Image (cartoon, rainbow, N blue to C red):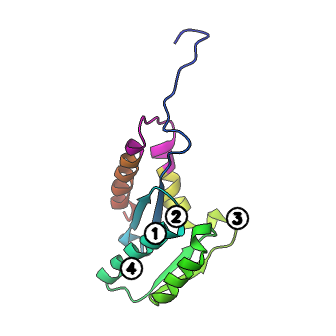
Amino acid sequence: MKRGHQRRVVTPGYNQRRNTFITLFWPKRNGFIFNTYAKRRSREFKLHLSNLLRYARRHRAKRVVLFVDHAPCHKTKNVKRFIRAHPILRVKRLPKRAPNLNPVERLVNKPFKSAVCTNSSYSRIDDVIKAGRRFLTKYKQTLGT
């Protein structure tokens, strides 16, 4: 690059983002499930909870205890109604402003962001989604080992 010239970095833009809901299972050998959506609203969180319920039924779980943070989509009336309608789900809220207590932040989100987002440039949002899914699928296999 010549001196005095600035390199143009292609980015997908501020308006193009995707949100991934991740539910980590304990014990670790069970891994986690994830769903990627265009928005982060209560509607998408309910879809993620529906997928979680299907997974729990397939594995004959009697109870699912969710530890959730204080994201607005976790606290809506719509989500509270959904959780009340499914007695298998129990919700425990993590304290506010305490991401270090959320194991998903430490075990999944931090490696995810460093592998997919840091020092990477994607020309399309679909490329970001593919890279994210590829990372999470591969990481899911190695998490319990």
Task: Give the alpha-carbon distance from disc 4 to disc 3, as whole Å.
Answer: 28 Å
Where is residue 10? Give x, y as percent: 48, 30
Q: Residue 80 sits in which quadrant?
A: bottom right
Q: Secondary structure at mark 3?
A: loop
Q: Earlier in the sequence, mark 1 or mark 3?
A: 1
Residue 59 visible: no
Looking at the rendered structure, the kind of residue marked 4 is: Leu
Residue wearing tag 2: 104
Q: Residue at x 33, y 83 (%)?
A: 57
- The reply to whether callout 4 and callout 2 are in contact (CB within 8 Å) is no
Task: Give the alpha-carbon distance from disc 3 to disc 2, as whole Å.
Answer: 15 Å
Q: Residue 102 sits in which quadrant?
A: bottom right
Task: Give the alpha-carbon distance from disc 2 to disc 1, as whole Å.
Answer: 7 Å
Q: Quadrant of the C terminus?
A: bottom left
Magenta segment, which residues?
113-128
Residue wearing tag 4: 53
Would you call the spot at circle 2 few (<14 residues within 10 Å), some (14-19), or many (20 or more)? some
Q: Is residue 81 above or below residue 12?
A: below
Q: Is residue 133 above or below residue 63?
A: above
Residue wearing tag 3: 97
| 110 relative to 96 in the view: left or right | left
Q: Which mark is residue 126?
A: none
Where is residue 82? Give x, y as percent: 49, 82
- The reply to whether callout 2 and callout 1 are in contact (CB within 8 Å) is yes
Q: Secondary structure at mark 2?
A: helix
| 66 relative to 128 in the view: left or right | right
Q: Earlier in the sequence, mark 4 or mark 1?
A: 1
Q: Nearer the viewer, mark 4 or mark 3?
A: 4
Residue wearing tag 1: 23
